[in-house]
Amino acid sequence: MALLAAVIALAPPGFAEDSEEGSFRIDEVNPTTQPSASKPADSAGPGEEPKLVAIEARDAEYHQSIKDVLRAMRLSPKDLTAWLLRHPESILHKLGSFSADDQRKVATVTRYIRGTNPSVAPMTALRTAGALVYYSAKYGIPVHLSTAVAHTESRFDPKAVSNKGAMGIMQVMWRVHNGLLQANGIATKDDMFNPEKGVAAGCLLLSRYINAYGSIPKALARYYGGSSTAYFRKVNTKMANIRSSIYPQ
């Protein structure tokens, strides 16, 4: 029960957050996840890192900007690490290994998301920001572009669905792109509602369109599904705002 006690101790009273399975509270532990009597929770087998040691080590990896944005959302690095114990596939497991500059970008984008749409839950905002920074770099597109598209398309709502069937934060059409998405690790239609995978899908498509059409305006027209001056103006305005936040003069 050592891990259970430690995880409970990490959370402030009443801490709750969203998850793919629904509401998650650190003080409500699924009995099936409790350690067995035959192996102490903070012990490690061959090749395993003790989980309690991992919590303290990861806490030290976060840049001050991440700690500051967590504090602004009434969370702490230990809250984040405790959440990650329940979500082993989250991109936020990589956050501590991001460069200082990229961690600052994650913090800035998180603040931007919460500032433009306060209804986005803190962990969803952080997951979305982490994914936008990570997948923008992976697919070679500017993070202020991907963030501006996400803002324009859904106001960062991972559950958004358009009347044409576009889904998730980046409003991707699963029925059109499912072959490409499945080939890149996005397995099911429901993945469109996962903020991290939804961002991955949108960044992948933006990258493909920029490479195919040779410019951001043409790529945005393809992403939108037709030429639209109004759409490009909205994205361009948001790009400028985000860029000035990420790269202040």
Image (cartoon, grey):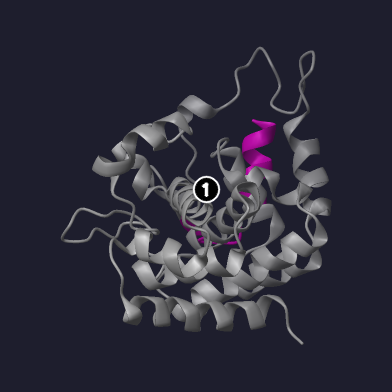
Task: In this rendered view, identify the residue nearer to me: 140 or 182.
Answer: 140
Q: Residue furthest bottom?
A: 249
The residue depicted at 30 percent of the width and 39 percent of the height is 189
Residue 158 higher or lower than 67, as above or below = above
Task: In this rendered view, identify the residue nearer to me: 205 or 88.
Answer: 205
Q: Which residue is mark 1?
A: 27
- Report if residue 2 lies within the magenta region: yes
The residue depicted at 72 percent of the width and 72 percent of the height is 68
Residue 5 higher or lower than 112, as above or below = above
Q: Residue furthest left?
A: 163
Specify the quadrant that holds the N terminus: top right
Task: In this rendered view, identify the residue nearer to me: 89 or 102.
Answer: 102
Q: Is residue 125 visible?
A: yes
> Where's residue 46, x and y in %?
79, 13
Count of marks placed on residues = 1
The residue depicted at 44 percent of the width and 47 percent of the height is 201
Specify the quadrant that holds the C terminus: bottom right
Q: Amino acid at mark 1?
A: Asp
Q: Is residue 126 left or right of residue 191?
A: right
> Where's residue 18, x and y in %?
43, 54
> Where's residue 38, x and y in %?
66, 12
- Range drawn in magenta: 1-17
Q: Residues within 10 Å of mark 1 (few under 14, many from 20)?
A: some
Q: Is residue 164 left or right of residue 227?
A: left
> Where's residue 35, x and y in %?
60, 24
The residue depicted at 40 percent of the width and 81 percent of the height is 234
Q: Is residue 117 visible?
A: no
Residue 117: quadrant of the picture: bottom left
In what element is the residue under mark 1?
A: loop
Q: Is residue 163 left or right of residue 74?
A: left
